[in-house]
Image (cartoon, rainbow, N blue to C red):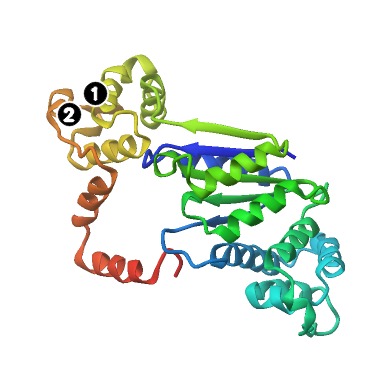
């Protein structure tokens, strides 16, 4: 069971699009995905618990009978383990949905088992030949030791089938002594196939393809514009998209009703300045928002990544 492991340079703005496009294609082929994102101050186990809870919440809302077999597998695998239900409350709701009577969790000795082992059994029960599972964990450079131990167990457990792990981390924030790299070396040493993909800024021609598609013009016509965009944005996809948007907002990129096509002021665009830092660039964009929206964003930031 190989791992598809993606390593990304910091703040290039390409990671989320690439990963979610891949997962979208996987889901269209009847695959299941569980997604979690770590943050610098994430509490231990909270990311995984939230990811699994969100997954079972969606399954419960779908009311799809196709997952009845999954319910039976989960019940047979974990029983009425209250520790998992406490961490993943929507798991209990999902199991009750397919039951003619309420499920009463059992408290006692089962709760003394390690959380990682229970989660491994749960993953094995979720995945199947009909509905394989991918666990996607983002920003693993901030993962806690419990999560890293779980990854080790998942990759070395021969009983877990029809399962893949997709992980992302910022390679400029880890070194050879980082706990994540230590764990990956151990996993590789046990014969697990790790596929590592380094993704950097997009190439000049790719920027031209993007501009050509966005403006519905042949690549030969957009090449002068895309060359300037590439020079300004350096191939950083987030900068490319935001720079094009700013050109339209400033009237330097506009649709001509006379010519019935997009036009641009190349001289003015060449003189336009753009921040070379993603955080600064985003901050400048936020500063022009209306005051109520900025106030709402400030309040949302205090609540964390999910609210």
Asked if 17 appears above or below 110 in the picture, the reply is: above
Question: What mark, if any, has residue 149 been given in the picture?
Answer: none
| SS of the residue under disc 2 | helix
Left or right position of 253 against 206:
left
Q: Could you tell me which residue is drawn at 19 percent across and 37 percent down?
A: 274
Asked if 73 appears above or below 181 in the picture, the reply is: below
Quadrant the C terminus occupies: bottom left
Quadrant hosting residue 14: top left
Which of the two residues, 27 or 298, is positioned nearer the viewer here?
Answer: 298
Where is residue 28 drawn, in percent x and y? 68, 44
Which of the two residues, 107 or 204, is positioned nearer the viewer here?
Answer: 107
Q: Residue furthest top?
A: 220
- Looking at the image, do the residues carrying marks 1 and 2 touch, with CB atoms under 8 Å apart? yes
**How many tags in the picture?**
2
Left or right position of 72 against 220:
right
* Residue 256 visible in the snapshot: no
Quadrant the N terminus occupies: top right
Where is residue 248 drawn, in percent x and y? 24, 38
Which of the two residues, 112 or 262, is positioned nearer the viewer here?
Answer: 112
- Near mark 1 (Cα within 10 A), the count class, few <14, some 14-19 or many ≥20, is some
Asked if 22 appears above or below 38 in the picture, the reply is: above
Where is residue 264 drawn, in percent x and y? 22, 27
Quadrant hosting residue 297: bottom left
The residue that mark 1 highlights is: 228
Question: What mark, if any, has residue 269 been given in the picture?
Answer: 2
- Near mark 2 (Cα within 10 A), the count class, few <14, some 14-19 or many ≥20, is some
Left or right position of 54 against 286:
right
Could you tell which of marks 1 and 2 lies nearer the N-terminus?
1
Q: Could you tell me which residue is drawn at 46 percent across and 64 percent down?
A: 42
Q: Rounded to the nearest whole Å, what is the CA distance between mark 1 and mark 2?
A: 8 Å
């Amino acid at each position: 069971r190989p791992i598809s492991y993606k390593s990304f340079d910091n703040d290039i703005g390409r990671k989320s699009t690439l990963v979610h496009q891949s997962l979208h294609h996987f889901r269209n082929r009847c695959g299941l995905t569980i997604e979690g994102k770590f943050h610098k101050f994430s509490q231990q186990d909270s990311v995984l618990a939230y990811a699994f809870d969100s997954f079972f919440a969606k399954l419960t809302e779908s009311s799809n009978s196709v997952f009845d077999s999954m319910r039976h597998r989960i019940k047979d695998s974990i029983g009425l383990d209250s520790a998992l239900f406490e961490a993943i409350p929507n798991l209990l709701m999902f199991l009750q949905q397919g039951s003619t009577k309420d499920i009463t969790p059992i408290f006692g000795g089962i709760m003394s088992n390690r959380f990682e082992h229970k989660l491994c059994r749960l993953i094995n029960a979720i995945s199947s030949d009909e509905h394989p599972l991918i666990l996607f964990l983002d920003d693993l450079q901030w993962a806690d030791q419990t999560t890293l131990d779980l990854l080790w167990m998942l990759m070395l457990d021969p009983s877990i089938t029809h399962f893949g792990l997709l992980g992302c981390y910022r390679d400029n924030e880890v070194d050879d002594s980082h706990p994540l790299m230590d764990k990956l070396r151990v996993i590789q040493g046990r014969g697990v196939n790790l596929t590592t993909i380094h993704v950097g800024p997009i190439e000049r021609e790719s920027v031209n393809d993007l501009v050509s598609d966005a403006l519905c013009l042949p690549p030969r016509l957009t090449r002068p514009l895309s060359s300037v965009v590439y020079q300004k944005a350096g191939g950083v996809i987030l900068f490319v998209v935001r720079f094009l948007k700013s050109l339209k907002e400033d009237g330097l990129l506009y649709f001509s009703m006379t010519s019935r096509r997009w036009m641009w002021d190349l001289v003015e665009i060449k003189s336009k300045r753009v921040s070379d830092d993603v955080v600064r660039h985003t901050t400048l964009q936020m500063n022009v928002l209306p005051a109520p929206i900025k106030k709402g964003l400030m309040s949302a930031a205090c609540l964390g990544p999910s609210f």
